[in-house]
Every structure is written in C-alpha cells, then in structure tokens.
Amino acid sequence: MKHKQNATELLKTSLGVLKMKTPISVASGTFDLETLEFYDQNCLGAFVCKTITREPKKGNTPPRLYETEAGLINSIGLQNPGLDMFIKENLPRYRDVLAVPLIVSFSGSSIDEFCRMLEILEAQDGISGYEINISCPNVENEGIAFGTQADVVHKLVSRLKPITKRELCIKLSPNVTDIAQIAKAAEDGGATSLALINSLYGMAIDYETGMSRVKMGVGGYTGIGIKPVALALTYKTAQAVSIPIVAMGGIYDWKDALEFIWAGASAIALGTAHFVNPLAAPEVMMGLGEYILGKGLSIKDIRGACRFS
Amino acid sequence: MTKPQYRQRSIVQREELSDSYFILWIWDEDMGAMCKPGQFYEIRALAVFEDAPTSVSIPRLFKPISIYDNQGGRIGFMIKRVGLGTNALSKLKAGDTLELIGPAGNGFPIFRDRKILLISGGAGYPPFWYLQKQLIGHNKVYWIHGGASQGDIFPCDEMWTEDGSIGRKGRACDDLEKTLKEREIDLIYSCGPFGLLKEASRISEIYDIEHYCSLEAYMACGIGVCHGCTVPIGSKENWDYLRVCKEGPVFSAKEIRWEIM
C-alpha cells in the first residue's frame, strides 16, 4: 500500500480505545517528568507512570542495580508513594505538564484490591487508560503472583473490565511457560490491549567474591540483551490474540522499534534505552518517520507483516 | 533548584594526574552558573561508541561524576579509572565529545564562621576541591585525605596512605578524634569509601558534631526516575529509601541508617 500522506499521518496508531499520535510509549518506571526536560514530549504517543500500589512501598534493600555485559539488572521492588499520595501529588503534576495521554500503571495484592484501586482511579480526571501490572518480578505478593496463571488473569481482567471504559492494558510477564495462553485469557477477560514484556528474571554474581550484585539475588533483567526474547514473545502473542500490543524489551533505536512492529506490535515502549540514550524517544520518532515516508508505508501497514520467504 | 539538563560538550583539556586519575575539562558558562559544590553530572563518552566496531558498541550507562572544579564555566571532572565506563572516559582527549546530564543532586550546604574538617578517601577527593574554594575565607578549613597509595593522594592539609608511601601510614580517620578535639571542629564534610564515611559518622555522633556525608551509589537514570540508587534515610524508627541522585548525594550523617546499609 502506497501513501502520499505526511509522516504525522503515517505514524498514527491506536490501542483498543486510545488513539496514539506516534507508536512510541514508555516502559513504566524508566521515565518520568524529569526525562521530559530533555525534549518535546510530542514524540510520545502515551506516557506510562511508575507502577503504584494501594499502600506506599519502601522498595527492596539496595544495592538495586547492576549493569551486565548487555543490559541491566534491577531490583527496585515497586517503591512508590501509594495510591492516595499519587492522586494528591503526582496526578495534578501530570495533568499540568502532560500533553500526551496518561496511562496509570498499578498493581494490587488481591483481585478485590485491584478493583478498588481502579474504582478510585476512575473518579479522577486526566487519565486515559490503565496498565495492569501483573508481572513485576521484584515483589512477592503483587505483580507476578497474578500474571502466571491463565485462570487467575481471566478472573482479574473480567472483574476489572466492567469498572472502566478507558484503555485497559494488561502487562504480561515473560517468565511463564506459554505467554500466548496468558494473553488469550486477558483478551477473553476484556482487556483492550496488552503490554509485553516485563523484565525477565536475571542475576549477576561477583565471580571473585561470590557476592550477588543485587541484594535480593534474583532481579529483573532488561535492556539490549533481552531483545530477541521480547521479539519472539511479541510475535507469539500477536499470533494468538487480536487486541493491540504495546511491545517492549531491549528497544534502543528506531530499527529495533520497527522489528517489533513487523512482529505484530501496534506500539512500542522504550525503557532501559532512556538510561543509555536520554534522547531515545525523539530519535526513534525521527527514524521511524524517515523510514515510513521513504517506503510510503504506515505503522498499520507494517504491523504484523513480517515475512518468512 | 535547577532541573538536570542533557548536553553534549567538547572536552577543552585533558589533564593527567596519576596512573589512575585524570581530569576532563569542558567549557559552558550556563552550566557553570547552574552548578554548586557537591552536585554531579552523569557523563559518558560519546565518541567511543560512534567509533567502536559493532562487536563492542553496546551502549553503557552514564556514570555519576562529581564536579571537581568550576571556574565560571570551565568545569572539571576528576575521574578515577574503575570499570568499563570510566575506562571509556579515560580514553578521551581534547576535542572529543562528552554527553552530560546535570547538574544533578542537592550539593553541600554552605556555612560561614565555622571550624570545618573535610575528610576524604580515594575518589572522594574531587567534590571537596570545589567545596573548599567556597569555604576558605569565611571559615577555618582543615582537609584530611587518604588513599591506598601515593597515586591516590592530592593536595590537602594532612595525607594518609595505607602503604605509607606518602604522608602518614594508615587510614584517613585513624586519628580523627584527636583532630576534632585539637582543632575544635564544629562541622564535618565527608566523602569516600563506605567504611570511612561510616566510621566518621560514628565518631561525629559521639562528639555531637554536625556532619554531612556525600554518598556514592550505582545509578541508572541519575535524575530521580528509576529509584535504583536509594539509601535508607531518616530516624531509627521512621526511615525511607531516598534517592542519592535527587534527595542526595549529600545527607546529614545522623540521618543515614548505617546499620541497615
């Protein structure tokens, strides 16, 4: 399909409910208003905040970071001020500053708590959608505890769906036997989109002393090293569901972004990339823009069109 | 406080100090007007990655480096080679480009008419060079610096080396109590290895002397986003993990929960 439109038109994409001006989103916990000091936010199609929980969370015992040969291990443990403080302090700032849709990422410790949090957030203006984090590898009772069993995912999403008409994006873990099965359960439950992948499990040890590099031992592995895994899981998921996918995992530049769109993603998110290139988002937009203009293809044309012969 | 900004700047001069220490100088009057002692920049070598063959071109994180000097915009970063990132920085020469994010962090509180002790160890030296320039003239300042060997020692009032190759043999805090009494110290700034800061904090608590520590931490973002660099700060009963890059790197010694670090 050949287009004569400008890049602005060709870069448009959409999730289930949410229209995005560009296919570029950000991975929860790697990006905040501080990053937006570096460039014009309009290169983003959506802004995802750091995951919040019902009560404040202190986070994991440091050290929490280690940079491996290829990518980063983190063990933050969802440190956040809790839902009430988020609504009181963070949300007004987001409303003031953001010109792009805000997606609130949150996690709960029971299905009832997820529902209660969603009800509270529904009463707030300035939120375009939710990322339901059922995949954080660094906390015990929230996060991944909900994301590894298809029946639990189905039950959770079915309970959340009637509460909101906003974007309901379920963030999936790669640390499962069959991501397609979990994805299908989320879709059947009423998810309007999926975000994947959250961090892989990862670990690093000081070979000399035997000391674990992060205090908690096993952490979440992100960045350039996980890209092939993330790409494969994006492809598998896209084959299994028909709802849109926000893909992430080791995307550092526009070429990486394109690979994920070919594999079936409607949008991509940058995460660890922000830490190695603060200008990653505008650079990805420029690169994607030049590519699609040159080829005369839109994001929608490319999505899921990867070839095998 | 100025929000950290992203810049690319050429290195105007490179200075060799010892086998493991060097200084990179850049020039930017705006940045010079923004920063203060104790703040740092996240820096990275731009050229190395562009020139590198594909096999080694995996981009690395920025490294937090404190401001060593600021002469009206002539900003110096005194760096010790420790790992991959600082080794890449050590290969830079005048004309190469640095990527910088900053100024970041809170910086040291500045006082007048005090009897001040600066105590630094190893790579804890650089931020004190910038700090003492603002303290001298308004305060009495005495600076103790220690390191493993001669190559870790730079100008100060009292030198210590673990191998005894220059100055006194031992560690920077070995004679600390005596110095505090003799010089009637009423304010301490410390920067350096964990052991030094912890010991200096133990002693300052005993003598009830106001004490500010500049802490070091592994960082990813350097701007308060990722919560990777946190340390426990507060009272024994009520503390939180605060970010070295944003609420720090300078904390009041009595608020640092050393017992759980």
Image: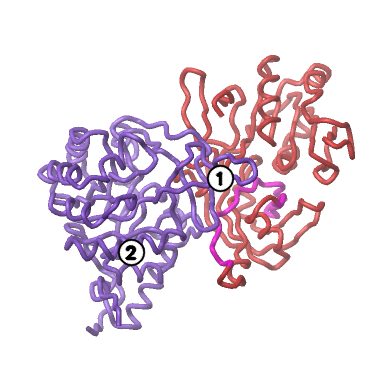
Chain colours: A purple, B red
Q: In the rendered structure, the residue with mark 2 lies on which chain?
A: A
- The numbered dot on residue A205 is 1
Q: Looking at this view, is B7 or A72 the one in front?
A: A72
Whether A232 is among the magenta residues is no
Relative to the observer, which residue lies in front, A32 or B9? A32
Quarter-wise, where is residue A163 in the image? top left
Position of A41 with respect to B228 (left or right) is left
Kindly tell me whether residue B119 is visible in this rendering. yes
Q: Position of residue A169 (x, y in %)?
A: 23, 52
Q: Residue at x 49, y 52 (%)?
A: A72
Query: What residue is at 59 percent from the left and 25 percent from the top?
Result: B258
**Which x, y percent locates residue A222?**
43, 53
Give the residue furthest to the left.
A162
The residue under label 2 is A232
Question: Vertical placement of A244 versus B136: above or below?
Answer: below
Gap between marks 2 and 1 measured at Cα: 27 Å
Q: Point out the stretch of residues depicted in magenta.
A: B56-81
Residue at horizontal 29%, vertical 39%?
A145
Quarter of the image with the C terminus of chain A is: bottom left
**Is A96 displayed left or right of A209 in the figure?**
left
Q: Amino acid at mark 1?
A: Ile
Query: What's the amino acid at mark 2?
Result: Ala
Q: Is residue B246 visible?
A: no
